[in-house]
Image (tube, helix red, strand yellow):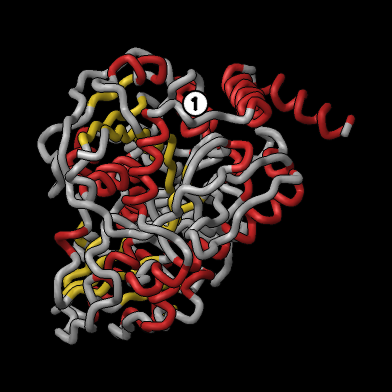
Amino acid sequence: MTGTILAIADSDSYLKYAVHFLEHLPQWRRQVMVVRSPVQPTSVQTRSALEGTFLQGRPPAVLPLKRLESNANPAPDVVLVAATGPVAREVLLQWSSGPKRPALVTALPGIALPATRRALAFRELCDLFLVHSVAEAEEFARLGTEAAEAAGVSLLMPDDAGAALAFPDPELPGDDGPDPADAPEVVAQLDAAPSAGSIAGPTTPPSTSPAATSAARGAHGGAAAATPAAPAPSAGPSDDLPMETELVPPPMALARLPMLRHQSPPPAVTQPLHRLVFAAQAKMPFLAPERRQVLLSLARTAREQPDVRVIMKLRAHRGEPQTHRERFPYDTLWDELVQEGLVRGDELVWEAGPLAPLLTPGTGLVTVSSTAAIEAVDRGLPVAILNDFGVDRNLLNAMFEGSGLLTSLEQVAQLRLATADPEWARSNYFHDAEAVATSGWPEVAAALDELAERARAGELSVDPAVAARARTRAWRARLRTRLPQPVLRASQLLRSVTG
């Protein structure tokens, strides 16, 4: 056993990521907690996230923010903060103080492109930020370099010793990935009364992902680093403060999405399609008419391809919490289409459980930009990334350019799905050990071991200026959750007028 690691999650996407990450660390003593908040997973979502892992059947405790530290037993050497931006910042603030604090590691739960400085700013206090592809590493490295230069901070780039630059995630990657920066209201309930639950104990399979090595963390006093990323669209209102203007990007490590089985894309499955799975996202596409178009096209496909079962795989049923707020739930829109007589109502099969059992030979995966597409590629299955609504950063599907997977609804209706281009895959989530070895980034396991040792020795510290900035930003976010809307809008107007 190399130490104790505690994962703190807040939503269903982050809980799934955290548990699967720990699944690759069986030699560690493992604990998991969920922060009580409006986006906390339901019991059904929790069961889905834990299925097939060391925590199956043992849901973690759901606790208010102020009770996390006192319920950690034993005290962790490493804390994995797997939470949406506003919550991640609150957790990092709580755990970063003290003379002998644990090492603080953060990550996004899925596709983290495009990258944003805002995402980095939420996690500025971490000692290590994990990215999951070469493309993400390069994007974040560039973004972090720009931010560091603006702040007058010197960062290390990958070198023979394995040191590298580092920064965190975009607040809005795929639906099962990044943080909703547009949910500051989450902070208001972080210290609410706790829910029942039990803290999970030890055990899980080690991640062979490469990561940043322990390197000078500049003013942060952290360890290990690696190469990060490029700007992304804002996940929501940016009146929380101009967080992009000041930040010291945290060290980064190149890891792997823990849900994937392969380092290289497997051979393509050639079995004829008998099932289409549409992986829904909370945000994309953005408009109700576009979502209705998806439903109408899938219903048509089901009617014209009677031997193919068409499944709507939801992140959550309407009304259930998600990492991102869903303005136009597909199941609500479907009911409207049925009432309008535009569909029969029996064309689609609706499911909201785990995705993995659906990714079997004979299945094709359809989505706008979900991380589910990467999981399907990992199974050798054909995939369609819909381009009917555009291909750009706002839809989070620009990263699929060159993948060979961009497809229209019309092509999907004809069952014309493709498999991923191998070269594209190598840069996007399927980097092998050789690619890691030549990148200058050490394995994540080594980075975590060193951080744990430094934590036990009391060698980790925080730049007072960075901590003060994080506290100020957190205070402003909390204030936004308590001010009446008219007062809030008036203050925002006044701020914009006075410059």
Q: Is residue 224 above or below residue 363?
A: above
Q: Is residue 482 left or right of residue 346?
A: right
Does residue 284 appear to the left or right of 448 in the view shown?
right
Q: Residue at x 14, y 60 (%)?
A: 357
Camera sees residue 451: yes
Q: Is residue 114 above or below residue 480?
A: below
The residue where tag 1 is placed is: 96
Amino acid at circle 1: Ser
Q: Depth check: 392 or 348 in front?
A: 392
Indicate the quadrant containing the C terminus: top left, top right, bottom left or bottom right: top right
| Residue 173 x %, y % | 48, 55
* Residue 388, percent from left and from top: 49, 74
Q: Position of residue 468 (x, y in %)?
A: 65, 24
Residue in the picture at 30% in, 75% down:
264
Q: Is residue 313 visible?
A: no
Return the residue found at the far left.
57
